[in-house]
Amino acid sequence: MLHHTNLRIGLTGGMGTGKSTAAAMFAERGFMRLDADQVVREELLPSPAVREAIRAKFGETVINADGHVRRDQLAAIVFKDPVALAWLEELLHPLLRARWREIFDQAAGEAFIAEVPLLFEKGMQNWFDFTVCVTTQSELQLRRLEQRGVPQEQARQRLARQLPLARKCELADHVLLNDGSPEFLREQVNALADRLLKSHHARLTGPLHVSPP
């Protein structure tokens, strides 16, 4: 028996593969879009408790004059120090899970597409009904990251912290290939969205969901 009425899709992939582009396409199909990085950036890091924990751990250099966390400075530290990165993730990930639980509970029956870069690395696949991995060629990844202003050395450092893209594809329930045009990706998203939404509708209206008399 189902324990929730949402359709929860976890979307992952490597940096520069096009996760956000795919998520936006799912949103066009009626999915409610969640972005792990956005929640961390806009809700968790500005919170006083998180800010003070980060200040106590890393010092004043990661706090700007307005009292906000300097995300660029923090990233420069943690992506060079696995211990510091693990500490930060242990601080943020339980808060992220709690926030998402609130969002899911407040939107019964809705379909969600959630971008989670470290979905498999952090064992979050059980949070979702299905997982989707966006993949592309490695040279395209690096090119897209350079276009976003990420130096190649920093991009390689960050990618090295993640599971290999091929392994993420193996673990995912569905794979989207983003090597071609936006239209090619959109066709894949639309086909998958059709299947998942149809399955979700059938699940909600099936015998297990009929209210007792």
Image (spheres, rainbow, N blue to C red):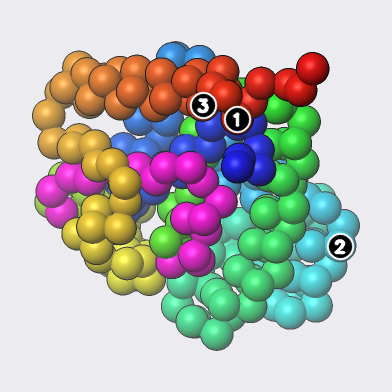
Viewer-side residue, 182 vs 142: 182
Amino acid type assigned to the residue bearing label 1 in the image: Leu
Which residue is disc 2 drawn over?
49
Q: Which residue is mark 3?
A: 203
Dot 1: few (<14), some (14–19), or many (≥20) neighbours within 10 Å? few
The reply to whether callout 3 and callout 1 are in contact (CB within 8 Å) is yes
- Callout 3 environment at 10 Å: few (<14), some (14 to 19), or many (20+)? some
Nearer the observer, 37 or 113: 113
Instruction: Choose the circle earlier in sequence order: 2 or 1.
Output: 2
Q: Disc 2 to disc 3, how far (Cα)? A: 40 Å
Visible in this render: residue 152? no
Relative image position of residue 56 (x, y in whole percent): 80, 78
Residue at the image position 60 percent from the left and 42 percent from the top: 1
Q: Is residue 65 magenta?
A: no
Q: Quadrant of residue 60?
A: bottom right
User: What's the magenta region?
Assistant: 121-138
**Which residue of the protein is positioned furthest toward the right in this rendering?**
48
Q: Nearer the viewer, mark 2 or mark 1?
A: 1
Type of amino acid at the residue the image marks with label 3 = Arg
Q: CA distance from mark 3 to mark 1?
A: 8 Å
| Mark sitting earlier along the chain (2/3) | 2
Q: Tag on residue 208?
A: 1
Disc 2 residue type?
Ala
